[in-house]
Amino acid sequence: MLKNSDITRLVHTRNGVALFSILAIVATLYAYFNANVVLPLGDKGFGIPSAVQWLPVGALSMMASLSLNLLIIFLMMLLNKTFNLLRSITPVHAAVFMILQMAIPDFMCTLYDGTIMTVVVLLCSILLFSTYCDADNTPRVFLIFFSLTLCAFTQYAYLPLLPVFFIGCIQMRIMQWRTFLAAGIGVIAPIWLLFGFGIITTDDLAMPRIASVFVSLNIYEAIYMIVTAALTVLLCISMWVLNLMRVIGFNMQTRAYNGFFALLSLAVIVLILVDYGNFEVYVPLLNCCTAFQVAHFLTVRRSKYGYLWLVGLLVIYATLYLWGVWMF
């Protein structure tokens, strides 16, 4: 018979991540086949089709979305393993992410910009962290800003991330004139390439069609999604406050890494409030940032009953999932 301490150890292993990932995937499949899934809106780019338009709606799009969610948890684990953000070798943040994602299965049932953006931000974060105190590593700075600008042609939500990563360069203590120049060229290069090679023309260039996801929802579905996102925002802020003193005690490098994620979390929360018409695209990134904050909290409280915190979180978000699936 499993003891409480054994269960706590389990949730801090890859087997625990696999267990919660399977649960989230099964929940998504059930919602896809049995619930009234609301697909995210597309056509919010500056000339290149948004990700939701890349594949036809159906099983292929859903499988691509689930595969990318698995890629996200892999990148989250790689980020911690490489840079030791949590000051503990634990993949529990990946398990938390899958729990949070499960709450709104609509956003896991199809390939769309929110999932793509989370992958891009994690990859750019890995590049950014690898430049710490290495101002000569300008090619990686260039690649960060090149990627974000290029992706902005498919979804305008990438644009507000440019200043976030610019401040991130300051946090990594690499801001020199060469860094500034590399970032600037990274922004200009994709524009020059897209127009220079005729991939898009001035006729293709158009302002995104700004339409709120809530237009396609009834009032009850809108309330469900707002409540879920609001709860995650509250969870993110609460965990950050509770973890603040612990993070302050880290060394300068680890503080810089966690400071960037704190800044990213704040930016995503502000964007959800300001750009509420594009609400759905920020949800996976919000879940990712929140997962890191929750993981900080859980790694400190690894007593034999520590798993109960995660179980409580699962109960709350599973309840939200059931609300969304059975009510609508």
Image (tube, grey):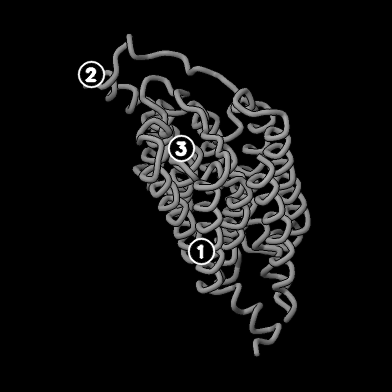
Residue 107: quarter of image = top right
For marks 3 and 1, the one nearer the N-term is: 1
Q: Reading the chain from its start, which is encountered first: label 3 or label 2?
A: 3
Looking at the rendered structure, the secondary structure element under dot 1 is helix
Q: Is residue 103 above or below residue 18?
A: above
**Quadrant in which the C terminus appears:** top right
x, y percent for residue 29: 49, 52
Residue 319, position as x, y percentages in the image: 71, 54
- Cα separation, mark 3 vs mark 1, equals 21 Å
Calculate the distance from the C-alpha at mark 2 to the C-alpha at mark 1: 44 Å
* Residue 57: numbered disc: none
Q: Residues within 10 Å of mark 1 (few under 14, many from 20)?
A: few
Estimate the x, y position of residue 302 in percent, counting from the top left: 70, 75
Residue 46 place in picture, x, y as percent = 42, 20
Residue at the spot x=29%, y=18% of the render? 200
Residue at image mark 1: 22
Indicate the amino acid at tag 1.
Answer: Ile
Q: Can you tell which of label 3 and label 1 is closer to the viewer?
A: 1
Q: Disc number at residue 112?
A: 3
Seen in the picture, residue 234 relative to 9 is either above or below; the reply is above
Q: What residue appears at the point 64 percent right and 27 percent down from the top-left corner?
A: 214
**Residue holding disc 2:** 198
Between 75 and 141, the residue placed more toward the observer is: 75
The answer to whether 61 appears left or right of 174 in the picture is left
Nearer mark to the viewer, of 3 and 2: 3
Q: Residues within 10 Å of mark 2 (few under 14, many from 20)?
A: few
Q: Amino acid at mark 3?
A: Tyr
First in sequence, mark 2 or 1: give its number. 1
Which of discs 2 and 1 lies nearer the camera? The answer is: 1
Q: Nearer the viewer, residue 89 or 20?
A: 20
